[in-house]
């Protein structure tokens, strides 16, 4: 099995971990959507040993990479990866979780994947009231977009016109349609954000 390597992982994993420490529950299951290479999953599972980390991805190559990294993981709180397509929320192989983490997916996927992410999150987090934590570059009304992010957005759309940076307000509206509400906005290095959503009833 071939281990994949995402260079950004080494740069962003510690800032993301700092936010996760604020937002994740003390115990329970964390469902990671679009876990990619698996490097984040291994790192975060080690950082949060009281949580069961469940990585998922729709790509067979990514699942193989996660499995390869997991083979050398010394702990017991990193579950075998599962095939999961965010755009098909009714077919997710996970019935419940205490938190959902999604890193660098919404801009490198069709809008249907974001729709599925929120629909699935609303169902899975309904009982626990846990967070949906989304990391990546976003557009925001009234906030100047960094030139590097504009260039990145153009390059993504050149690769696939269905891709591109999403407006944070569009995600807020999508969340509201599924009974979720944004509970936090964390500014991150390299012009990224972490947006946190929770069932609206838990915020009342």
Image (tube, rainbow, N blue to C red):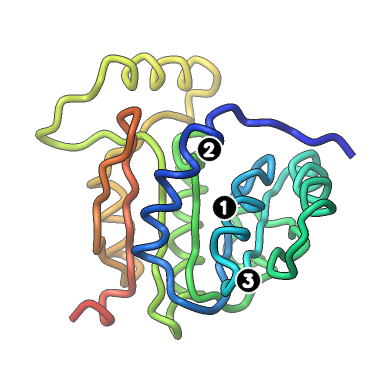
Alpha carbon of mark 3 to alpha carbon of mark 1: how far?
A: 24 Å
Residue on which disc 2 sits:
109
Total number of numbered labels? 3
**In the rendered image, the vertical position of residue 90 relative to residue 95, given as above or below:** above
Residue 132 found in image quarter:
bottom left
In-image side of 146 versus 3 (left or right): left
**Sequence-first disc among 3 and 2:** 3
Residue on which disc 3 sits:
52
Residue 187 image position (x, y, % from top left): 26, 42
The residue at the point 26 percent across, 34 percent down is: 139
Could you tell me which secondary element the residue under label 1 belongs to? loop
* Tag of residue 87: 1
Could you tell me which secondary element the residue under label 2 belongs to? loop
In-image side of 83 versus 176 (left or right): right
Q: Are marks 3 and 2 in contact (CB under 8 Å)?
A: no
Between tags 3 and 1, which lies in front?
Answer: 3
Residue 188 image position (x, y, % from top left): 31, 39
């Amino acid at each position: 099995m071939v281990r994949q390597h995402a260079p950004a992982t080494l740069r962003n994993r510690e800032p993301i971990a700092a936010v996760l420490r604020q937002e994740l529950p003390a115990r329970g299951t964390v469902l990671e959507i679009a876990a990619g290479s698996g490097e984040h999953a291994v790192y975060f599972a080690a950082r949060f040993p009281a949580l069961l980390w469940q990585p998922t991805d729709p790509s067979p190559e990514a699942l193989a990479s996660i499995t390869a990294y997991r083979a050398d993981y010394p702990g017991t709180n990193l579950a075998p990866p599962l095939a999961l397509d965010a755009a098909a929320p009714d077919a997710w192989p996970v019935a419940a979780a205490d938190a959902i983490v999604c890193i660098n997916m919404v801009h490198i996927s069709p809008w249907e994947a974001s729709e599925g992410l929120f629909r699935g999150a609303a169902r899975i987090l309904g009982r626990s009231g846990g967070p949906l934590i989304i990391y990546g570059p976003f557009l925001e009304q009234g906030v100047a977009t960094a030139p590097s992010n504009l260039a990145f957005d153009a390059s993504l759309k050149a690769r696939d016109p269905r891709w591109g940076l999403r407006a944070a307000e569009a995600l807020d509206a999508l969340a509201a349609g599924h009974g979720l509400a944004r509970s936090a906005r964390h500014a991150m290095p390299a012009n990224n954000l972490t947006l946190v959503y929770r069932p609206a009833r838990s915020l009342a």
